[in-house]
Image (cartoon, coloured by chain):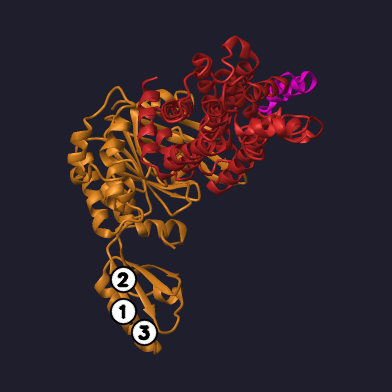
Amino acid sequence: MKHFLTLTRMRIRLTLRNKMFLFFSVIMPFGFFFLYAGIIAKGDPRIVRFLLGPVIAMAVMGSFWGLSASLVTFREQGILRRFHVSPVTAADMLASSIVANYVLTIPTVVSELLLARFIFHVRDFGNLLSFAILVTIGVISFASMGLVVASVTNTMQETQVLNQLIWLPLIFLSGATIPLSSLPKVAQNFGIFLPATYLVWGLQASIFSSLAIWKLWIEVSALLAWAILTFFVASQLFRWEPESKIPRNAKLWAAATALPFLFLGVWEHSSGSLLMDARAAYRSIENSDRPERPSETEKIYRATPKSTRPAEPPSAPNDSPN
Amino acid sequence: MAEPVIQVENLVKRYADVEAVRGVSFHVEEGEVFGLLGPNGAGKTTTVEILEGLRTLDSGKVSVCGLDPQRDSNALKNEIGAALQSTSLPDKLKTFEALQLFAGFYSRRRDPEELLKRFGLEEKRHTFYSKLSGGQKQRLALAMALVNNPRVLFFDEPTAGLDPQVRREIYDIIDELRREKKTIVMTTHYIEEAERLCDRVAIVDHGKVIALGTPRELKARSGDKTRIEVRLAKPESEGDLIQLDGVTDCRSLNGTYVLHCQRPPQAIVSLVKHLETRGNELVGLEIATPSLEDVFIELTGRRLRD
């Protein structure tokens, strides 16, 4: 426990000295924040509140980049070996990565809430307890995924390629950039198998729909099960030595981490409740009884003749006419 | 004398299809500096890393401080200190932070401040690891090995890749530790390092210990003979040279003839005379006092650093 804390402090310190961290944890999240809140939502507090879910989900998910990269660098350069001759254990190493990452993600998330409050006048952040729990489980699970990535790749190059392959579907098919309900059916069917989808939805439901944590038990327990599974797999596949081989069954182990969301996706596919809820939430920002000025989105949506309206409500961020 | 701190019996380690260590045995007593001397790839590092608990062994018996490095690896890591080969620290970690960080992992520890002073790193205390010179990095590695005031120290190639002046600095540090009666196991492929620093040396080649003893004992084994290395304009037969007055042995190594002789002056005179009668010429000559290199050449027919 003591080693774990010592290591965590060092990881935080080193990360703060890393320029890559500045990009992934400061520039990128705040870039997204202002893009969404300022340009897409045009500063409308209700829409900003609606979009806070995806924006914060990005900050939470982004954690896996830096983590996999730093662990692979540590192994490649023989830094892990040095720790291996000291009493530090693999669990110390992995847990400190995740906790350091958590500590470093919180300021970003809190600043985004504060900016939403003071620049964009969002007054109500829904259920902050549900929100906090989801952020916590989200960081732990996505960070653990980063650790799995680090253990199934050998070089920094391989790690970055794999990160890209994971990152793109995570942000484009999960509702983090384009609302799920406005994606083509095929993409939706794929999206419901992604952990990111449930994180985005959970965060949105807690902030925008003020859902209490027990109403989000499906999202929370799936993410939690995933976090435990990925951490377990990461600790099984952990390698100290640069030249030690990836165990033959490693890919199988890594693939096994998809199980919780495979089950959830199958269930979701048959019940369709998540998509229904997402649509309902979306509709609620459309049809709300705001007094004077309807949002741009709403105006256009309402101006569209019923017959030509798409089956799903048009989406706010990327492809919609706002 | 008490039980040896380190005992190694018939140690074997295989990597895929290569046998890196093929039945190595030795023991190290408390307070001695023990050297594993041999060319690169001889199995020194593998042996040491098994003792440190970093690698598993395939067969044989190993005990360090009465502990089994595999079974009791956690307990062992508190007792040992190591400066590894091919290791590094995070680029953005500062010298003092590194010492402090590692000191934090042990309950028995030395003052990082004192180590910083002793290893001459005071001025570099706030310097990032990536900005240290090779010698400074190595001094930091040695200081870090001492951070838990360990019972046994492992130095794997402590001077590899350093220039001669820095190497001498490292020698002084190890000498000082030796005077303090620290138990040290070190590997090296530098003859002079083994001779100068080690109380006992095991010469290792192709995964086997081919000779073991104090440097003096080992040199005595090759008969305390002076070695004359000559290069000739035309080849000569070894058989002819061995007949010369004062020469006891002759081998040719890559075009150089190595003559072992008990009385060097006579040997040189008779060599020159012999070459004159054959119309041959002496192109180069070097006289070396007996060293572990001779032992190595004698046992393997190769030079240590070929």
Is there CB contact under 8 Å for labels 2 and 1? Answer: yes
Q: CA distance from mark 2 to mark 3?
A: 15 Å
Disc number at residue B270? 1
Dominant SS of magenta comes to: helix
- B211 or A82, nearer to the observer: A82
Give the residue type at disc 2.
Gly
Residue B235, image x, y percentages: 45, 81
Report the chain holding disc 1: B
Does label 3 or label 1 sit earlier along the sequence? 1
Report the chain holding disc 3: B
Q: Quadrant of residue B3?
A: top left
Mark 3 falls on what kind of element? Answer: helix
Find out whether residue A212 is within the magenta segment.
Answer: no
Question: In the figure, B142 relative to A48: above or below?
Answer: below
User: Could one spot residue B56 in this view of the protein?
Assistant: no
Q: Residues within 10 Å of mark 1 (few under 14, many from 20)?
A: some
Give the residue type at disc 3.
Leu
Label 2 sits on residue = B246
Q: Residue at x 40, y 75 (%)?
A: B241
Q: Which residues are magenta?
A: A256-275
Question: A184 left or right of A79?
Answer: right
Colour orange maps to chain: B
Q: Residue at x 38, y 29 (%)?
A: A7
Residue A2, image x, y percentages: 36, 21
